[in-house]
Image (tube, grey):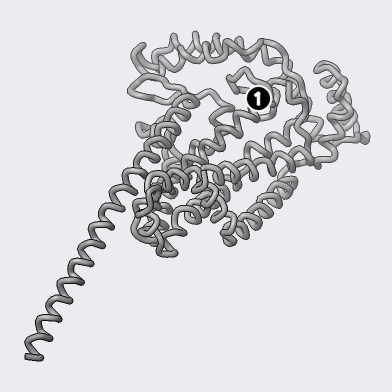
Amino acid sequence: MKIFLCECKKMMSFRIFWIIFVCLFAINGYVQIDRINDRYYTPESYRSFFSETKDMSLEEIQDYTNEMLERQNNGEYIEFPMMLVYDMSELSKECENYPEYLNSIKEQTNNMSAVSIWGDSDTFSYRNIQKTPSAYENLPAEPLPLAASFGLENTFTSPITDFMGIFLVFLAVCGIILKDREHGITFLLSSMPKGRSSLILSKLFAVSLFASFVAVMLFAENLVIGGALYGIGELQRPIQSVFGFYQCNLAVSVGEFLLLFFILKIASYLLFAMIFSLICTVSRNNLMIYGISGAVCTIAFLCYRLIPQNSVFQLFHDWNPIKFTQTAEILGTYQNVNLFGYPVSLKISMIIIIVITIVSVILCCIFAVEKLNHVQYQSVRLKVFHKKKSRRMEDFFMFVIVH
């Protein structure tokens, strides 16, 4: 525990990290506020509409919006922007028709299974189609409530937050793993009783703590700003009522979805933290660390962006560290991975891969530290031997010259 506390204290004194963190935290907040300009109506009008309709049923909301659209068409003044009224009218219809949507999934499965274009019964497409209805069977076939959700959408779909988060995780790893090497005390620490396995485990624990801190702080900021601007509505309502999550197959509330979101977001950041830690542990200089880390992130990003879902290389798109940071996309949609022709849940496989990778990286770091310290110890012994040998030769020549 003392080693872990020392590593945390070392990180707390890493001024460059905290300066960059404050700057990126401010930039992230500005970007969230600036996203107001991407919508056709202001947050004030959005909140005002839900305040006006909070006690209305779905049918009453539809009548209310239809009446305002009629008045707008007749050239009369309405208190809300037309695009807002139109959007709320369409969303209320979707919420009311949600039971029909669930029934259509089963009907669509039967229709697609009868078409030969989807392949034989031993193909991935056919198996995936047959598996789809069971993924939605636990959802209650009831109309969804219409409530404010743009605050949640801003939290889940931030375009730049993950880039900042991964960069801050890399800085935290460098501050914890590389400081000893930069100060030239790595070999001295390694010679101590707890200077190998205990030390690297404490460093990885500290890295995990600060990676979790980065994930929670950045997305908590998004949630606070989104909630202040647009509101988040009742946390007890189904997640399917949130705009953009209509097709989610998880039978959870908004509050439970938020909890799952933060847990998986932290897990995805921990995955990057462990990858960066392994690179820092096995690399011999800082230039190699920056190059390998940049290459890993670039390759992962290109695989995520360039490989399509129907490609034979689909696994490199789905089982990808960048993909794993898209937590809302993974939780909010039903998607299976093609594993040798069998559909495997992306949600479950993501958790398994992250756990296996983190455990493997920890074992690799311990092995690398033990092996590297052994090599360094042998190197130091060799240098001492050559130094003693050279001194003996100097003494011999000095004896010859003198005599």
Which residue reaches farthest bottom?
402
Q: Is residue 166 left or right of residue 124?
A: right
Name which residue lies at 44% across and 17% down. 128
Q: Position of residue 215 (x, y in %)?
A: 59, 42
Determine whether 378 is above or below 48 in the image.
below
Q: Position of residue 378 (x, y in %)?
A: 23, 57
Whether 390 is drawn above or below 401: the answer is above
Q: In this orientation, which residue lies closer to the viewer: 310 or 245?
A: 245
Q: Secondary structure at mark 1?
A: helix
Residue 342 x/y as whole percent: 37, 19
- Quadrant that contains the C terminus: bottom left
Between 6 and 220, the one lying in front of the other is 6
Residue to which mark 1 is pinned: 256
Q: Nearer the viewer, residue 90 or 359?
A: 359
Q: Residue at x 91, y 35 (%)?
A: 79
Q: Position of residue 313 (x, y in %)?
A: 36, 34
Drawn side of residue 403 relative to residue 9, left or right? left
Residue extending furthest front?
403
Q: Residue furthest right?
A: 76
**Residue at the location (68% across, 15% down)?**
98
Which quadrant would residue 310 be assigned to in this image?
top left
For label 1, the crowd category at 10 Å Cα-Cα, with few meaning under 14, some 14 to 19 and many 20 or more, is some
Q: Is residue 115 left or right of residue 373?
A: right
Viewer-proximal residue, 387 or 251? 387
Numbered-mark total: 1
Q: Residue at x 55, y 50 (%)?
A: 8
What kind of residue is marked 1?
Glu
Relative placement, left or right, of 367 versus 357 is: left
Q: Is residue 324 above or below residue 15?
A: above
Which image quarter: residue 256? top right
